[in-house]
Amino acid sequence: MDTTIPGFRSVPRTGVIYVTHEATRHGFVYGHPEWANLGQGSPETGSIPGAPDRVEAVTIAPAAQQYGTVGGVKNLRQAVADFYNAIYRRGKKSQYTADNVSIAGGGRLALTRLASALGNINMGHFIPDYTAYEELLSVFKAFTPIPILLRREHGYKISPADLKEEILGRGLSALLVSNPANPTGQLIEGKELSAWCDLARECQCSMIFDEFYSHYIYAGTSAKKAKMISAAQYVNDVDKDPVVIVDGLTKNWRYPGWRISWTLGPKAVIEAIASAGSFLDGGANHPFQNAALPLLDPKNAEAETLAIQKHFGQKREMVLARLKKMNIVADAPPVGAFYVWANLAKLPAPLNDGMSFFRECLKEKTIVVPGVFFDVNPGNRRTSARYTNYCRISYGPEPEKLEIGLAAIARVIAKFKK
């Protein structure tokens, strides 16, 4: 029974945290050999074929025992700037410097700093999208979150022309974009991404790109060259263009436990979020910032990315094929990230409901995330829920865990077919 304590509100758990909590009540613990967590939002963190050796030890210098600066140590900020200049901005006059970078303790904290620095504006966001955006967009009252629906019949994408109508028609001064998208795996790249950056300049709408999955690309990839996507490639002036990028070691380098992220953008934005960090969190883990420096070497990142795209691409093909045989389909197959936005409509009742499907999977020691959690609804201003017949299935885990989880899903379906 819930107990209300004076002065406190009820804070909901985000989708992944909720399903993990429910699974724990059924006996789930991390590392349990019989459980498969196909709801996880993190990639496998061990060795994969072709990837650089994993960091297994961190040496802490005496100076790193002290607090780091709120915005991050300068060496790491410069390394991040150098990485983006080398990968995306060769030959461009305007280059990122350490002053264009802020370091934070993970992606959600980086986004929280940004949200706390926004003014009294209309802030656009998409549906479906990352479950943690809901509370992030709810808790800060200075801005008004405005939803933009991505339609299944359009492949969960929006054209630059339609986006311009949304920006101007809804009076948006900022827009939050995950690219590639979580949970649908759709990608904005090339001329399309360039057009989005043009809109940011033309409409004076700050675009905040969550690029945490930008190395997990499966379309137009090569067996010999890594493919990375970033809006940084299409920025004209790093200090004037209203384009802000958030990324980190969590997904693209497969070090989620390090909790090291960065924000890249105009100096004015970086100064504002550093001020926000001074009262929100005080700064990221100091020793791990120093340990991150070699990982930002472009050759290291390219080798890691190439290995990711081959390994996770194979897992993607296997999971999509196995799910299709079970009548679980992806309306728009993922071309990025490591999720299948799974349509359960063809399954027998009650499995065609995402929450029921989730609960039945728990009985077989497998975790998925019901689709309703991705119907981002800040402040619960809408009463109707979308995506009740969807779930998100992750192929982030190791292949052995995927096999266990897919076999469990097959057992669940077979049970209800009988």
Image (cartoon, rainbow, N blue to C red):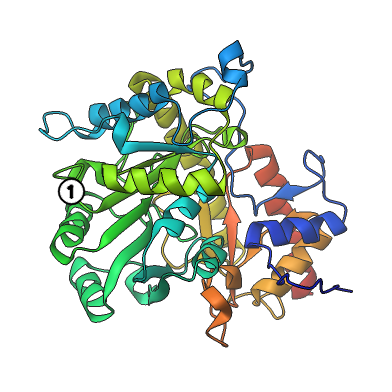
Where does residue 188 sit, x and y in percent of width and height? 29, 55
Between 144 and 392, the one nearer to me in the picture: 144
Q: Quadrant of residue 399?
A: top right
Tell me the SS state at disc 1: loop
Where does residue 239 sit, x and y in percent of width and height? 20, 43
Where does residue 37 sit, x and y in percent of width and height? 70, 49
Q: Residue at x 57, y 20 (%)?
A: 54
Q: Residue at x 35, y 19 (%)?
A: 299
Where does residue 215 sit, x and y in percent of width and height? 40, 39
Crowding at label 1, few (<14), some or many (≥20) Cα neighbours within 10 Å? Answer: few
Quarter of the image for the N terminus: give it.
Answer: bottom right
Outermost residue on the bottom side: it is: 383
Q: Residue at x 64, y 38 (%)?
A: 398
Q: Is residue 64 left or right of residue 295?
A: right
Q: How many marks?
A: 1
Q: Which residue is mark 1?
A: 240
